[in-house]
Amino acid sequence: MFIKIKCPKCQTEGSLSLVESSYQGPYRCWKCRELFTIRLEDNELKSCEPLSQEEFAKQQEIEAMKAKFKRE
């Protein structure tokens, strides 16, 4: 399922392909490359907050650790 997301910075419409109807995590605008933390519920955008590159890297590290412990 494709979800349409309008970038708060440049107003360009992008899309995100999801398996589930809910998602919380990072999103990068394809045009201006700005990072955001988004929250989707029932295929609707509920929140969109700016995200720094450092915060994005921390989120990626946390997700990698979660995935590592799930496999063991």
Image (cartoon, grey):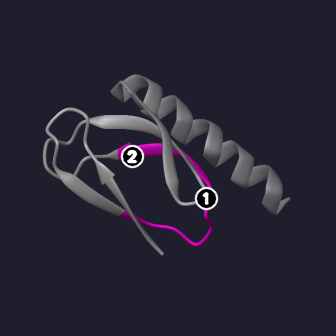
Other residues around mark 2 within 10 Å, as few (<14) / some (14–19) / many (≥20): many
* Region in magenta: 16-27
Secondary structure under tag 1 reads loop
Quarter of the view holding residue 42: bottom right
Q: Spatial distance from mark 2 to mark 1, Cα to Cα?
A: 17 Å
Q: Amino acid at mark 2?
A: Tyr
Judge whether residue 9 is colored magenta: no
Quarter of the view holding residue 72: bottom right
> Disc number at residue 42?
1
**Disc 2 target residue:** 27
Name the residue nearer the viewer: 67 or 42.
42
Please provide percent x and percent y for residue 66.
Answer: 73, 46
> Image point 50% across, 53% down: which residue?
44
> Image point 80% across, 62% down: which residue?
71
Secondary structure under tag 2 reads strand
Please provide percent x and percent y for residue 57.
Answer: 45, 33
